[in-house]
Image (cartoon, grey):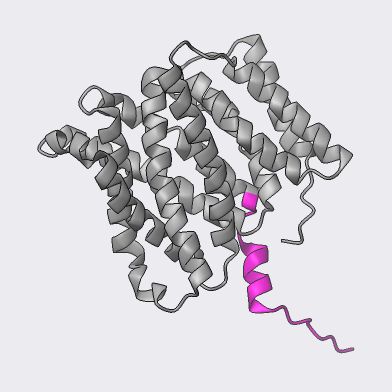
Amino acid sequence: MTSSATSVPGGARRLAASPPPHAYFVGSAIFHYLGPAFAVLLFVRVEPLGVAWFRIASAAVIFALWRRPWRRLSTVGRTTLLTVVLLGLVFATMNVCFYVAIDRLPLGTVAAIEFLPVVVLAAVGARTARNAFALGLAVLGVYLLTDVRLEADVFGVAFAFANAALFAAYIVLAHRLARDRGLARLDGLAASMLLAAVAVTALAGWSAAPSLLDPVAIVAGIGIGVTSSVVPYVFDQLAMARLSRATYSLMVALLPATAIVVGIVVLTQIPTPVEVVAVALVVAAVALHRDGSRA
């Protein structure tokens, strides 16, 4: 008796052997909350705009040394270049708005506002009763976690809403870049970060300048860049390449839940019963949601 093995294309074999996209997202979510731990140290030495500059600038240097994206930009089309440029501008302005907002408002308030446009992105792609129900669970869970409230600081609220809109733009542009075959996704991310460094230097470089001779500020700034802008954004690209935009948008609801877990492990902050219920709702929503895309 003879038998023959069915050949499997190399690309399909690599895809099957790679981690699931949800694992990349969880990795991104974990590192997303390690960055603020460094920011706590840096806020006492550097103004919020300076922290934004350190985060983007250090990430840009790392991406430049790692990917050298300028070598491939000349081979891509105009649409891809436009996506790279827009994403770079979004990176710069989003981080500036975020740090100004959390300097004037509670982080929970900023997080709640940030989630609002993401809900819209997830709702656009829901399309089934099951996914719509999952979205409702996620919204309720995030609401309970963040204890939504608006403070009297109109200036801070304005920056929080600007950050929210830019975060939604990040999801749209980064997802488009992850699916673009004209440029390796990490090279596109690296090029965008380099452009972001130029833009954020014009916006906030002056605020970081006095701290460039402070070794502690420099080390902490590099830590923020790695944990907040290198590792999470790389994981996002790897996840977005295989997840629909609506699914990724819904999974963003896991970020507050991840913050609770990090708080328990790192800061021994035990959640309240309401927070436990909220985390359960968010996890149930992500488990219930089904991605209809073939990717």
Q: Residue 196, relative to residue 39: is it above or below?
A: below
Q: Which residue appears farthest toward the bottom when viewing the image?
A: 2
> Is 14 one of the magenta-colored residues?
yes
Residue 47, image x, y percentages: 25, 27
Where, by quadrant of the figure, is residue 222 drawn? Answer: top left
**One can see residue 261 in this view:** no
The N terminus, quarter of image = bottom right
The quarter of the picture where the C terminus appears is: bottom right
Magenta residues span 1-21
Residue visible at 36% across and 22% down?
A: 103
Q: Quadrant of residue 178?
A: bottom right
Q: Residue 30's x, y, as percent?
A: 50, 37
* Magenta span includes 130: no
Q: Is residue 125 left or right of residue 264?
A: right
Task: Please state the horizontal and vertical placement of residue 86, each as a whole percent of the image.
Answer: 46, 55
Taking 118 as reference, is 193 above or below it?
below
Closer to us: 4 or 293: 293
Q: Is residue 83 left or right of residue 200?
A: right
Residue 177 vs 230, above or below: the answer is below
162 and 133: which is toward the camera = 162
Q: Residue at x 39, y 59 (%)?
A: 190
Give how far across and how far down residue 293 sits, in percent. 76, 57
Q: Left or right: 254 with respect to 151?
A: right
In this view, the residue farthest toward the left is 213
Question: In the rendered image, which quarter is residue 49 located in?
Answer: top left
Q: Who is closer to the viewer here, 6 or 262?
A: 262
Disc tally is 0
The answer, for residue 110, to whether it is visible in the render is yes
Residue at image position (37%, 30%) is 99
Front one among 258 and 246: 246
